[in-house]
Amino acid sequence: MSSVNIDVAAQRPTLPETGLGRGWEPAALTGAVLLLLSFGLVNLYSASSFLAQRQGLPDTYYVLRQAAGAAAGLVLLVACARFPYTWWRPLAWPLLFVAWVLLLLLVLPWTLDIAPVVNGARRWLELGIAFQPSEFAKLAIIVWSADLAVRKQGRFRGLSKGLLPFLLVWTAILIPVLLQPDLSTAFVIAMAGAMVVFAGGARVGHFVFLAIILAPVALAQLGSGFRRERLLAFQELGAHTSTVGYQVHQSLIALGSGGVMGVGFGEGRQKFGFLPEPHNDFIFSMIGEEWGLLGVGFLMALYMAIVLVGFRIAQQAPDLFGQLLAIGITSLVALHAVLHMAVGLGMVPPTGLPLPLVSYGRSNLLAVLAGVGILISVARGDPRARGTHV
């Protein structure tokens, strides 16, 4: 009798195995993502309607374009969730090569027709549709780094056979990103790759050694051109409020005006020409103004939920490759969110990084949703049925 009961219990499904995934993690992750998307679209309309009208466009111009990107991104999410995550391993090198070629097209002198200069940088490719190759490169570097980290298990003790191959390939990707120029994106790509490799077993001492070597290069980058001006403005926030520190100053005004409850949805004033890029680089500040501390807390709670569930999926991944994929993707979302909010709070100089799933920008939106799909695919491996890492 007991054996019959056990067989029946084993066959009784607790959650559907034919949906996005097994267990509560995929459902929690999807729920948090959908809430962020919805909250983002609502706030994007408020932040962008005046800007669109000032440009002679319908007030719904930006939000409708973002909604179309969200719809395409959700299709991509479902597709990536349904594909076994192990399929990405043989595609690691091809994905990285395609990313490198696309990034190279941005900086070649004879590609200005398809990679024009916008706001002093070449970050967009126009091949029928306009997109940012760097967003694709972020996922490509995570997949490639995870694959190579699995292959190099046991060889991370030595710098030449362990970390050096990663550095050579990362450098090939980062050089065209720096030439755009886009230092903040280069930093995010490097950090995402480093998180994957560190989780894969790389030695802390090697990273410290490399940080010491690369410090003069980083200081040289930060000490020239507009980056130097932004750094000086960051060091003395109150001394450059009408010049290079104007953005952060207006951001702090927006956040301070919101108080605890906010001034009310649609009632924010900083979007009326005071705060540059209120729908993109500083949408966090707009949320703080209109929704107050409660809205900011709600936003941060959703990101915290995504990060915690992402790392839980990594912890329970059926193999090391899945674990490293989950760590890399989760770290990427966390880095974007933390750096964007830190800029709005005046804690770091302006970076131009979007707030994931909230800021206007379909390239980043598609990349993040594809990454979430891969996370769900890792969760579909049902590690509780195996309990081991390979």
Image (cartoon, helix red, strand yellow):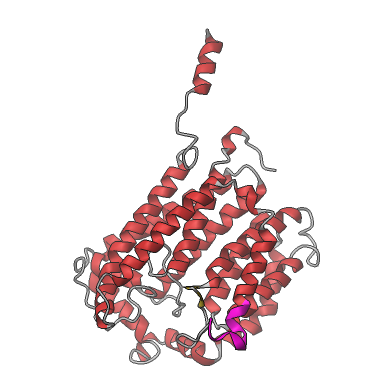
Q: Position of residue 209 (x, y in %)?
A: 71, 72
Tell how many labels. 0
Magenta residues, start to end: 104-114
Mostly what secondary structure, the magenta segment?
Answer: helix
Residue 3 lies in quadrant: top right
Classify residue 220 as left or right of residue 360. Answer: right
Residue 267 lies in quadrant: bottom left
The one of 123 and 297 positioned closer to us in this rendering: 123
Q: Is residue 224 visible?
A: yes
Q: Does the segment drawn in magenta span residue 109?
A: yes
Residue 7 lies in quadrant: top right
Q: Is residue 386 above or below residue 232?
A: above
Q: Position of residue 325 (x, y in %)?
A: 60, 54
Residue at (42% x, 52% y) in the render: 305
Q: Quadrant of the C terminus?
A: top right
Residue at (27% x, 60% y) in the render: 294
Q: Is residue 246 above or below residue 140?
A: below
